[in-house]
Amino acid sequence: MDAIVKMLEKHQPFFEKISRNVYLQAIKDGFLGCMPIVLTSSIFLLIATLPGVVGITLPQPLIDWCNKLYNFTMGVMGIMVAGTTAKNFTASMNRRMPAGKVLNDGSTMVAAQCSMLLLAVTQFTTKFNGSELSVFDCTSMGTRGLFSAYIAAFITVWVYKFCVSRDLTIKLPKEVPGAIAQNFRDIIPFGGAVIICGIIDVVVRNLMGVPFSELLIKLLSPLFTAAETYPGLILIQAATAFFWFIGVHGPSIVQPGIDPIRLANQAENLQVLLAGGHPAHSLTFNMSLVGEFGGTGATFIVPLLLILFMKSKQLKAVGKASIVPVAFAVNEPLLFGAPMILNPYMLIPFVAAGCVNVSVAKFFIDNVGMNGFSFVVPWATPAPIGIFITTNFQLIALVFVAIIILLDAIIYLPFLKAYDKLLCDQEAERAAELGLESDGAATITASTSAPAVEQTAASVEPTAAAADQPEP
């Protein structure tokens, strides 16, 4: 462990350089601005789904109300992130603008949100009660549309920079109030950004047959139809985690290409089980319980590690806030609060833990006699319980669960310790600057190394009722 910590500390300047990339910084700060959405929506998601896991049936109106609150918060996360990312990218760009020229961050924020809708949302007409209605497909308005959100934000700000730098704006006399004059100056760059994204949308739909938000799914799905081999399972899980790590909803990209295989294998496992045989398929629908043990990144054990072993106030607070949601596969508070996403210290464990889990699962199914997953359990079922149920209550499944919990802890702990040291140094420095005494929870002498990675936020798109689930 000490060797890994020292290795990470040695590369701290490199991590800092990555974290200060203006594009990554805009994305991270954009997520940070949306943290209230994540935390609030997670509460309503748990209220709507958790009672069903333990057999309690809530009144349907209450469930519908919670789902509505969730859908109109996390369900539009992509739109919100487009705006906050554009606003933060605008702030970075303004520091590089010529003297006297400034981009209007309010206007870039709105333009990016409009552009994101053009890239991500499909409009169609349908009949309802005899009338023809215009309808939006909302699927990609949430975290599934994050890729479109980033592209819209960056295109928008660059168009504004191009126009403002070259005075391609509508100028009004100096007597016109500043707010009104600014609105007219923003017309040309606003129109340019929206038109460019609209053209991209038309081109992608005509060439690929899908909206821009589905482009990655269309291009990469063939890669994930690999056979049930160790490399195939590892590729699927690594891609799911890596896409989430860079802020793109991994399950939405990876799982559509393998869903037919997963569902067919799980159905076959059930038939074999009912016939008294050994279900041997490992690539099944509920393999998500293993690869996404507690959520993408296999984060089930991470909150407990933060509470027990970390000294940083920030990480201890995140651990306490996320331990219950993560137990029920809602790990957004952890992903965005630590953060895990776009945090160079977390890349290796975030990708590796799930890969190790699915490899161990395949070994247990092929060689130890553990059943392949045969039953479908609610996505919010705590992973250890879900694995026990879907293997038909085998005791060996509990041994398997204990082993992957231990392995995940071993994988995460050295990287968390290195990151914790970094945050403790930051907290000590801030306390010294403010003339405060560091309390025992975070007392580590400030290092003389380069400034630490700035902490910001970077999370599943759930479908209508789930977040980082084993894909509902």
Image: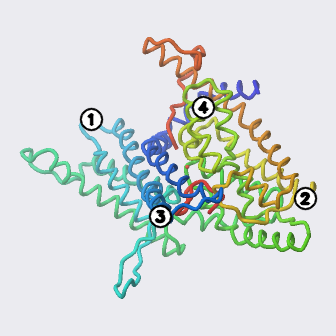
Which residue lies under the disc numbered 1? 99
Q: Quadrant of the C terminus?
A: bottom right
Instruction: Work out how far the residue at label 4 is from the one at label 1, CA to CA, in angstroms.
Output: 31 Å
Residue 342 coordinates in the image, percent (x, y): 57, 42
Instruction: Work out how far the residue at label 2 is from the one at label 1, CA to CA, in angstroms.
Output: 67 Å
Label 2: element kind: helix
Which residue lies under the disc numbered 4? 14
Residue 415 circle label: none
Residue 245 coordinates in the image, percent (x, y): 60, 47
Instruction: Work out how far the residue at label 2 is from the one at label 4, CA to CA, in angstroms.
Output: 42 Å
Asked which quadrant contains residue 302, the reply is: top right
The amino acid type, in three-letter code, at marker 3 is Asp
Q: Is residue 345 above or below residue 324?
A: above
Mark 3 nearby-residue class (10 Å; few <14, some 14–19, many ≥20): few
Asked if one can make out residue 447 in the rendered structure from this viewpoint, the answer is no
Instruction: Work out how far the residue at label 3 is from the one at label 4, CA to CA, in angstroms.
Output: 48 Å
Instruction: Work out how far the residue at label 3 is from the one at label 2, CA to CA, in angstroms.
Output: 42 Å
Mark 2 nearby-residue class (10 Å; few <14, some 14–19, many ≥20): some
Label 3: element kind: helix
- What residue lies at 60% left-to-right and 65% top-to-bottom? 217
Which residue lies under the disc numbered 3? 64
- What residue lies at 59% left-to-right and 33% top-to-bottom? 15
Residue 366 circle label: 2
- Viewer-nearest residue: 336 or 48: 48
The amino acid type, in three-letter code, at marker 2 is Asp
Instruction: Work out how far the residue at label 1 is from the one at label 3, CA to CA, in angstroms.
Output: 53 Å
Q: Is residue 47 above or below residue 135?
A: above
